[in-house]
Image (tube, rainbow, N blue to C red):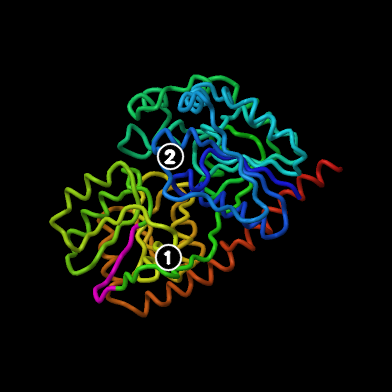
Amino acid sequence: MRFCHVTTFYPPWSYGGDGILVQQICEGLARRGHQVDVVHCEDAFRLKRKKLDAEPNDPPGIRRHRLRSRWGPLSPLVTQQTGRPGLKRRALAEILTGSYDVVHFHNVSLVGGLGALALSRAPVTLYTTHDHWLVCPAHVLWKFRSRPCDGPQCIRCSVVTGIPPQWWRYTKWAGRCLEHVDAILAPSRFTAERHRAAGIDRPIHVLNSFSQPLSAENAADYRSPRPLFVYAGRIEASKGVEHLVRSFRERPGYDLLVAGAGSLLEQLRADHADCPHIRFLGSLPHGEVAALYRAAVAVVSPTWGPEAFPLVNIEALSCGTPVIGRRAGGSVEAIERTGGGLIYDRPEELLPLVDRLAGDPGLCRELGQRGAEGYQRHYSEERWMAQYFGVIEAIAEARRA
């Protein structure tokens, strides 16, 4: 089959887990003998970063289309404001007129907006809600840069957040664009329900994210004689990292390693420079993150904002490492399903769970084994591909009928 995947960010021109997941999907399809084109927006990546950490090395079977405009950053900004491909329309339309069997849209916020959905000519058109952009201009249901969203005040929130208000959101434009999609794929039950509650009436299928097994080959040795805990992800307020670090100031007998980048990184480094047991590692390649997971007593997911479905959790489970997760949106669905960790609701409940795992190696082994087994049953690439092709075949069969 011929696939085209359209997304704003694709490694190495990417930030966060959605680009990694799209890459894993494309590479998994290519390994199965399918032809895969992937379209992403280089201009959007360069809004925040000018240089790459590494040059792309795509495997056989994947053809990459990097959308670049001579207008540079103006191109994604036009798309953000209008919800349309704008300066990229011609290039995107030429690609999507190819004879694809499936066109699959992912994060389209800056690569073409919802207007790109109408350009698909494939028998099957899919859209994945990696986050909550369809119902939240800020993507993450994080209100006024300070708390989880408790109700729509989107224009005021956009201004406070520094996002130019998107007036197309207050018209029927989004609904008309989504009519071109055969099905929406949601990574969690929470995300599916949140979109249905917002009035989106296209068919929505829950298709949990997956993770390929992580290799720690040639990585550093992070093992410690002291109990070691790990955070990996964006260093932003909605992720709850500030609460996590403040909590670990009270546990100088444990080590906390924080991997990732974001707007709070340098401030947190400065604020906690007096705590040698808390270290900020910055962005790490996947092999190093896998080595961190395997050395840890547990991975802590302290998110405060309503998550769609954190990829970090299932990566940790795949390594046989327990996860301590805070309940927020779809953040703990993988922990509940596999039994591979512990869950808390309020910040003050975190440290008792940390102490419990630090003092009970047997419980850590039990949770790690449950998590690894649950990963194989529910979050492996093979399981995801079987469900994915099931959705595609059901749509194709309905069209034939």
Q: Is residue 379 visible?
A: yes
Sort mark 1 into few (<14), some (14-19) or many (20+) by Cα contacts within 10 Å: many
Quadrant of residue 86 within the rendered picture: top right
- The numbered mark, 2 or 1, whose residue comes first in the sequence reads 2
Q: Is residue 345 left or right of residue 242?
A: right
Q: Residue 286: where, in percent of width, then height? A: 44, 59
Please tell me the numbered disc located at residue 73. none
Which mark is nearer the camera, 2 or 1?
1
Q: Please, what is the three-letter code of the amino acid marked with disc 2?
A: Val
Please tell me the numbered disc located at residue 140. 2
Q: Residue 58: where, in percent of width, then height? A: 58, 52
The residue lying furthest to the bottom in this view is: 362
Quadrant of residue 295 within the rendered picture: bottom left
The residue lying furthest to the left in this view is: 274
Quadrant of residue 29 within the rendered picture: bottom right
Residue matched to label 1: 290
Front in this rendered view, residue 280 or 303: 280
- Which segment did they paint magenta? 224-231
Q: Please, what is the three-letter code of the amino acid marked with disc 1?
A: Ala
Relative to 395, residue 94 above or below: above
Q: Is residue 165 left or right of residue 106?
A: left
Q: Residue at x 43, y 72 (%)?
A: 368
- Circle 1 SS class: helix
The residue lying furthest to the right in this view is: 401
Q: For the residues marked 2 and 1, what is the alpha-carbon distance in whole angstroms?
A: 26 Å
Asked whether residue 144 is drawn in magenta, I would say no
Q: Residue at x 62, y 25 (%)?
A: 89
Q: Contact (CB < 8 A) between labels 2 and 1?
A: no
